[in-house]
Image (cartoon, rainbow, N blue to C red):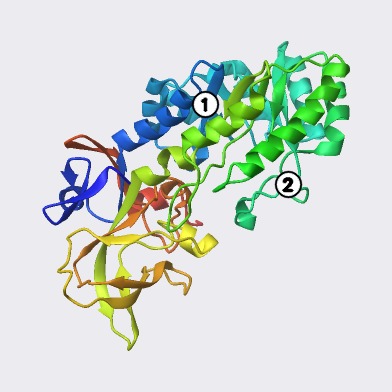
Amino acid sequence: MSAFVYRRGVLYAEHVALSTIADTFGTPCYVYSKADIGDNWRAFDNAFGQRDHLICYAVKANSNLAVLNLLARLGSGFDIVSEGELERVLHAGGDPGRSVFSGVGKSGREIRRALEVGIYCFNVESADELGRINSVAGDMGAIAPVSLRVNPNIDPKTHPYIATGLRDSKFGVAFDQAAALYREAAAMPNIEIRGIACHIGSQLTSTTPFVDALDRLFDLIQGLTQDGITLHHIDIGGGLGIVYHDEQPPTPGEYVSALLKRLKDSPHKVLIEPGRAVVGTAGVLLTKAEYLKPDGEKGFVIVDAGMNDLLRPALYNAWHDIMSVHQKDPTMPQHLYDVVGPVCETGDFLGLRRPLQVAAGDLLAVTCVGAYGFVMSSNYNTRPRAAEVMVDGDQAYLVRERERVDDLIRGEHVLP
């Protein structure tokens, strides 16, 4: 959150007051810092030094074209999980030849499109998928570059909804089946084996699970080498956590250092897929307090942003700090409030039991929403999605227009 600081009692994004952004673009509104995104990405890139590597930003974390274009200009590759994300990368000026295609349900159409544009690699997650990729590539007269996403059965110690490396997860090829599937891939006429991949989960706050996963991969790689199967890269996935509340995750430098220590004797190119750690802290959600409902020990602040705008609190019971855009008198008492939205659900909240000084009409900023904020938003209750703004120094740019109700009903038809 280094780009979001108080100046003269007002919360700023870089050199633009959030109150000015609210006046100009309205609320609710997502605001991103260009400087923070760039600094976070470069922290990973610089940590590798001269080691051959490729950073593939996880597009699912925040897929706004301005974000993707900024990262493409920095030299980032991309980790995509759908044809739509691939097209976003292309529209943003990203290089498909520096991008990996993950995900458990790739359709034939998605595979064909990825081969047409020259994807760097498919991260294959099942035997059926491998067969489909070989078949589609054969029909096109192409060779498909693949890695197997191996499930190392490592507990990442994170929320169960975002733990992806355990045996009962839908993701990846089971560790004890991977060697046999690699041998099948090596015999397929339209498959080129590029590497090996794993991704064990998201919002990890220790390097230990990453290193444990690498150790398991090296056990598998040793056996594959004996079988004459050569791997050119190791993709350790993403998942490094950020500080939402009181977490203490390693820095990108500490994370990469732990990986390189284990990889020091390996000839393989290293791929990583950070998402949250690049954009998470670089965004806030601006919202306005519409009404207050005092109720004894704890009251309610009803704001104009809801669970359709930011789903993480309702879905994961996730914590996001909530700050007043205009600083209050520190000598005045605070009151406990549930910060809730207008959506017709009891689970529609942005924060519970928060100590705040707030009045109707005040602006609040929900922090650390640059990842899995807007991308998970919806039109539930026929609510148009929020605007998105990117701040660059002393300039604020509208990078997504606020939806209107007309946008939501376009394409719908009543019966004759």
Alpha carbon distance from label 1 to label 2: 24 Å
Task: Please tell me in which quadrant of the rendered image residue 360 appears.
Answer: bottom left
Residue bearing the label numbered 2: 170
Judge left or right: residue 210 versus residue 355.
right
The residue at 31%/72% (across/down) is 355
From the top left corner, tell me how far across and down residue 279 is, in percent.
Answer: 41, 40
Residue where numbered disc 1 is placed? 55
Q: Residue at x 42, y 68 (%)?
A: 349
Query: Residue flagged by tag 2: what amino acid is it?
Result: Lys
Q: Residue at x 44, y 45 (%)?
A: 371
Residue 403 seen anywhere in this rendered image of the structure: no
Does label 1 or label 2 sit earlier along the sequence?
A: 1
Q: Quadrant of residue 133?
A: top right
Label 1 with label 2: CB-CB less than 8 Å: no
Identify which amino acid the numbered label 1 is placed on: Ile
Pick whichever, 401 or 189, lies toward us: 189
Identify the residue shown where x is 30% and y is 43%. 2
Q: Nearer the viewer, mark 1 or mark 2?
A: 1
Q: Residues within 10 Å of mark 1 (few under 14, many from 20)?
A: many
Query: Does the rendering let one see residue 174?
Result: yes
